[in-house]
Structure formats: structure tokens, C-alpha cells
Image (cartoon, grey):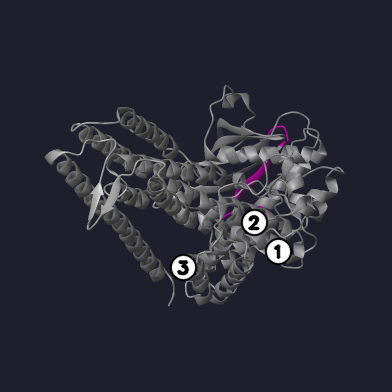
Amino acid sequence: MVPDSDDPALDATQAAENATLATRSPVSTAASSSSRISLPGYELGNLLGHGGMGDIVLGHDRSIGRDVAIKQMRSGKPSADQVSRFLREAKIQARLEHPSIVPVHALGHDENGLPYFTMKRLTGTTLAEQLASKSPPLRQRMLRMFADVCLAVEFAHSRGVVHRDLKPANIMVGDFGEVYVLDWGLARIDGDRSEGGAIGGDVSSLDGETQDGALLGTPGFMAPEQIEGAHTAGPAADVYALGAILFEILSGEPLHPRGTGALTSTLRGVEEGPAARRPFRGVPPELDELCISALKTRTQDRPSAADLADRLQGYLDGDRDEEKRKQLAATFVLKAREALESGEVARRAEAMQAAGRALAIDPTSTEAAAIVQTIMFEPTKQLPPELAEVLTTSELSVQKRQGKVAMLSFLVVLAYLAVASINGVSNVPLVMGIAAYTVALASLVWRVTQRRAQPWHMIGIATANALLAALLSRTYGSLLIVPAVTCIMAVSLTSYPLLIDRKWIVISLLVASWISPVLLEWAGFVPSTFALEHDAVHLTSHVMTMDGNHTISVLLAANITTIVVIALFANALAASRRNALRQTEITAWHLKQLLPR
């Protein structure tokens, strides 16, 4: 509510709000009951609250022995207008005889001639306190309570009374589940009524006594027409407030920002319902539509409070409009199909979400199921940015793992050079150079593979490996061990994620690394390591000493290692592919069980 200390209407409302607090829990006060004016037939207790025109005190009715809440005007010289407002509130509340409206027991005057009235003393908590609680009541319980509030408001409307200040703070839930609508200080008499039960006679509307420009109500719950002029606020204004309360129950947050900023937000209109504002709360579509309908800008487009209660009760009783759900699901199917047929990768997620909502609303929708299947089992060539990032991260983990395996391969090369050198080395600088190059290459491979790399980085690694294979051809020639080593390199390098689609670059580099030394030997640029004589092939090494059983052992070990490494590597790739395929099929099977057939 917008405070204005110069406006007596707002003072009256503030007093009513404090009366609400008074009915909940007594507050200690230094003022004793003896300092107040005594009332015949009542024992006055603690001060429960106070407002602009009156105080709320705890009282005990001696005649029937019950505690009551007594609202009395403060001592002083109130104006005739203030007294009229005070009496007006008491009379409106007293004549609205409904289980959810606090009953007024008596109206009288104290020894100074000031009016007071007594009403039922309530115990409980307000809806505002429940919504702000860390563990609020279940949604179903709050919705049933809200349906009772709607019926109470409809009762007031049927008697020609518009509340004009409905909000969670003015709704109390008793300790035993009873619900009360509080604070009728701003209530307005909505024209003349012909019904026998209509309020009239000596109860007049507040509008005729309100200063021009006065703002009556609470920003955030006031309807647009109420902001523009309180005298125009009819029953539809209360319905708007009920819609704002329902929005907060469903979404867990206010419809409009608190304070005066709510005025601008209200006049701008409601742009989204609770389901769109907080999609993760799973707001049922029926309640989302019901809430939006109550918040329409045009008063004639809003339902009545009774309609709100009926539709809400129908939902709570499980009487859902299946046809309406199918129509709503069809709307989401159209959105999903439009997003999918647009061909835009970024909209595939939108299509999936819309189709998923359609299935949530109507699980029998075969069209929504078909869209989901299309998106899941017919992936687009171009991936959405979020998915592309996930796949890049996954491929990076594979690259890191293979980089670690490559370290073992370089250790095997160094061990091969060390063992082969035991029998003798004829070109020590070349062997030491190959060993140093292997260590440097291992360091480079580690640095590149353990972080996010670019394709040209991996092509550089493949080129460096090809050069290592060419250097190794000088140890025992190009025809003996190097083909097996080159084969291992080919299997390993072409399995890197960044090189899978660049396999021919890798293969070309490795083939060139093997055939280049052979061509150089044929051309006579380097000493030949093999010769054809009659029916024999003679192999020669200009680096290692080839003599005795040691050389045979080295060659046997090298070839056995080659067989084992290639077999294990191929098996690991096959096992990885099998597990990925099995996981894909298992996931697809389970997902298909979710879809209608």
C-alpha cells in the first residue's frame, strides 16, 4: 500500500492491517490496560496493534466469557469524517456474514463517546508468511485455501462490496485450516444493488470522500483501472488481485516488483504467466491459463471470482478438461514443428522443449513423439553451440588419454635404441640424435595433447612422427622394423579426434616417411641398407652392429612388440566402439518407451 499520512482513508487501512497483526499474536507493551479508556462489560488486555485512527487491544467479554479483539478509536478529537470512516468499516465487515470473513460481534461507544467494535480474535499465520517460509505448505493445500478466498470475495461482490486491497498479507490461515479475508478498510460499495441481501442504507462508498489523486490499494496487487482511478475499481479489480496472488502461489515469486515500481509494471501489462516465469516449477497448464485470464488488462476479459473458484476446484478434484489439454498440446506441437522446419540449428533445442511440453500435457500425442524421435535419432550435420562444446570437451578427454598412451610408445622407442646399441654402434652421433629427438617429440606431444588443440597442431605432431619413422629407418633399414613402427604410428595418429577426418593427410605423411629413405638410397644420396643378389635380399645397417644372437633377439622382440601393440590398440578401439554403440542403443530403447506408440 502506498502510505500517505495526510490521507485518512489510508490511515484507516493501516489500522486494519495492524488489526490483522493483532489477531495473530499479542505483543508486549509498556501501556497497561488501566491507561486506556475502560469499556463496560470488557476487561482490556495487552495492546495487539495500532493504526492510523485506532488501536487493537485484547479484550475479555465478561458476559459470555470469551476473548475478543477490540478496535477502538484513539482518544482525542477525531473529525466527523474519521468517525464516519471508522463506523463504515465496522458495518461493512459486520454485514458480510461469511465463514471466511471475520465476524463483528458488537459496535458501541466508550465513555468519551468514541466508537469501538469487537470482533473474533484469530490465531494463525498470513499467506504472506507462509509464502516467505523456508518450507511453505504444499501447493495443493494453498490452492484449496485460495479457492475458499475466491468464494469469500465472490460473496462480497454479490453484496455489492469490492475489497480493493486483496494481497497475501490480508489472507489468514487459522491453526485448524480455516481461511479469513482481512482488512476491509478500503472496501467500496459497487453501486446500487437490488438483491435483498445487498449492502446499502447507512453504508456509503468511500470514493465520494476520497481526495482527488489519492492512491488506494497495494502496488503489485492493484488492477490497472484501480491505479488510474480508485472510483472505477469494481469486482474485476479484486479478480486481478486474486490473479496476482495465484501467480505468487504458483511461481513462488511476486507478479510485479515490490514498491512503487509495481505501478509501471502493472500498467505495462502481464507479459508471461507463472509457467513461463518459472518453468522448473512444473506449473500445470490449466492453472497457468487460469492465472493469465485473471490478469487480463481489460476488465471484461477477466473471469469472476466464482469462475476462478469453480475452475480451480475442478482442477483440484481431478476434473481436467482433456480437450483443452489436447488443444494446448497441439499449440506446442505447432511451435516445435515450426522451430524444427526452420532448419536453424539454434532452434532445435526450442523444438525439443516445445515437443516435450506437448507430451507432458498430452502423453498420447503421436505428433509430438514423432518430432522428439526425429530430433533424437536424426541429428543434424551442424550441431548447436552448446552440444558442440560438450562434444569438444569429450573429445579433449580422449585426446588426453591417447597422449598418455603415446608416452609409453616413446619409452619403447628409447628402450629399442638402448637394447640395439648393446651389440655395438657404428654411428654414435646419429643414435644419440634420434634419442634426443624422441625425447623432444615426447615433450611436444604431451604439451599439445593435454590441452585444447587445433587441427594444425595435430598435423604438426603427425609430421614429427613421420620424421621419427624416417630416422629409425637408418638403424636396421627401411624393410625390417620401420614398416611395423610406421603401422603403429598410423593406427595411433588416425584415431585422434582431430585427425579422424584428416586420415589421408596422416597416411600420406607416413607413407612418404617410409618411401623417402628407400628412394634416396636408390638415387645414391645415402648409403643403401639393402641389396638384391640373385634370390636373396641382403640387409645392412650403417648405424648398428648386426652380429650374433643379440641382433636376432632384438629383431624378434621388436616384431613381437609390434604384434602385441597393434592387437591391443585395435581391440581397445573396437571395445570403445562396441560400448558406445551399446550405450546408444540402450538409451534409445529406454527413450522409446517414454513415447506413445
Is 451 rendered above or below residue 318?
A: above
Precedes in sequence: disc 2 or disc 3: 2
Front one among 346 and 241: 346
Q: Is 281 colored magenta in this rendering?
A: no
Name which residue lies at 62% across and 62% down: 344
Q: Which element is circle 2 on?
A: helix
Q: Which element is circle 3 on?
A: helix
**Residue stretch in magenta:** 94-114
The furthest residue to the right = 212
Q: Residue at label 1?
A: 302
Please report contact status of discs 1 and 2: CB closer than 8 Å, yes or no.
Answer: yes
Residue 122 visible at all: no
Expressed as whole percent of the image width and height from the top left, the position of residue 392 reads 48, 48
The furthest residue to the left = 549
Is residue 424 toward the left or the right of residue 454 in the image?
left
Is residue 565 toward the left or the right of residue 130 in the image?
left
Q: Is 111 colored magenta in this rendering?
A: yes
Q: Residue at label 3?
A: 377
Q: Residues within 10 Å of mark 3 (few under 14, many from 20)?
A: few
Q: Magenta part mainly helix, strand or loop? A: loop
Q: Residue at label 2?
A: 243
The furthest residue to the front = 534
Expressed as whole percent of the image width and height from the top left, the position of residue 387 reads 51, 53
Residue 189, by quadrant, is bottom right
Q: Residues within 10 Å of mark 2 (few under 14, many from 20)?
A: many
Name the image quarter holding the N terminus.
top right
Distance between mark 1 and mark 2 Cα atoms? 10 Å
Is 197 rendered above or below residue 442?
A: below
Name the image quarter holding the C terminus.
bottom left
Expressed as whole percent of the image width and height from the top left, the position of residue 277 reads 60, 52
